Image (cartoon, grey):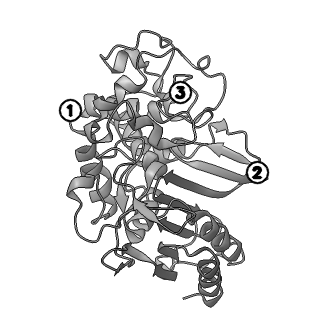
Amino acid sequence: MNLDIIKRLNAIQDESHFSGAVLVQQNSEALAETSYGFANRSEQIENQPSTRFGIASGCKLFTAIAICQLVEAGKLSFDTRLKECLSFSFPHFSEEVTVHHLLTHTSGIPDYFDEEVMDDFEELWIQTPMYQIRSLQDFLPLFQNQPMKLKVGERFHYNNAGYILLGLIVEQVSEQKFADYIEQNIFKKAGMVDSGYFEFDSLPSRTALGYLDFSDGTWKTNIYSLPVKGGSDGGAFVTVRDMANLWKALFNHQLLSEDYTCKLLTPHIYSDDENSFYGYGVWIEKKGDSILKYHIMGYDPGVSFHSAYYPENDIQSVICSNKSEGAYDMFKGIEEEVLKIPYKEKTDGRKKN
């Protein structure tokens, strides 16, 4: 264990009352693995490293990997147009929208939750009860008949609806339910034994409830704040160890060939933040001409999540929280300590690629 990281985590937790689990590792060796707070406040059940947490949009990476697997298998291409992939009606969408545009948030299609104009995710369920959202098709009425927001390829515009469409493409091309495809072709191959797309009204053991805290000290769970079952734009549950396994499997080419891993991790589009780019389902931060980190994040009511892989020193960090805020402070504190750590050769003697 790295005492500097542990001390930093404890200091941040003392100040922010972080609730969740954290794992930092290098070459599969844990530099920090700890947990704080309660998975179930009413029953005083503590969070553990083995607790499953919702990760919201963090699982867009899974969707992107699935699409790349299907392209690699010759069942699809990045240039395939939306109208060639899906039989659903999108009367106002441009016919120029491709799989690549959807992956990089450059399609210009409307979003069912537009973060540029909406603040409260719960607003969505006033007209459409969240308990009716159990499949990817259930999301379509929220956006399929709206006009285009932007011209195709005009600019980066973070878009959840685009990833719903990608999930539907996975279902149509693979002839499997989206969750089944991910569990079979990503979770199983990566050794993510505790991860899944669970339903709020049928959660397995060791799953943290998400909490929303209010200024008067009261709180509520997020069971009425999110769809019953997550999908291709967000909503999977993972453990910190499973997420670290995903990074290892990805960079060891267990999920995609080296060529398609590179396509996934290419900085395809500038995201308007300094040194920040987007690949396929993953954020990429550059430092000069080199890659500082690949990272994913997710925020929902009662969920905050950050995870990153730092290629220069082969370190992964995973921060899962069952509160609406808290993961970012832990993430940045860890990053400041991680960037001080030099590369360490693997114990089997292999050199860094």
Decide which of 215, 276 is in the foreground and name it. 215
Callout 3 crowding tier (Cα within 10 Å): few <14, some 14–19, many ≥20: many
Question: Disc 2 vs disc 1: Cβ atoms closer than 8 Å?
Answer: no
> Which of the two marks, 2 or 3, is nearer to us in this view?
3
Q: Residue at x 22, y 39 (%)?
A: 177
Pointer 1 residue: 175
Mark before the other along the chain sequence, 1 or 3: 3
Going by the picture, which residue comes out furthest to the right? 288
Type of amino acid under label 2: Asp
**Marks 1/3: CA–CA distance:** 23 Å
Q: Residue 204, how many percent across, how many down?
A: 22, 64
Residue 13 horizontal side relative to residue 320, left or right: right
Q: Residue 132, how many percent across, how many down?
A: 26, 37
Pointer 3 residue: 101
Q: Residue at x 26, y 28 (%)?
A: 172
Q: Is residue 121 above or below residue 300?
A: above
Q: Residue 283, how many percent across, how many down?
A: 59, 48
Mark before the other along the chain sequence, 2 or 1: 1
Residue 205 horizontal side relative to residue 7, left or right: left
Q: Residue at x 37, y 67 (%)?
A: 239
Q: Which mark is residue 289?
A: 2
Type of amino acid under label 3: His
> Which of the two marks, 2 or 1, is nearer to us in this view?
1
Type of amino acid under label 1: Glu
Callout 2 crowding tier (Cα within 10 Å): few <14, some 14–19, many ≥20: few
Q: Secondary structure at mark 3?
A: helix
- From where the camera sits, is residue 86 visible? yes
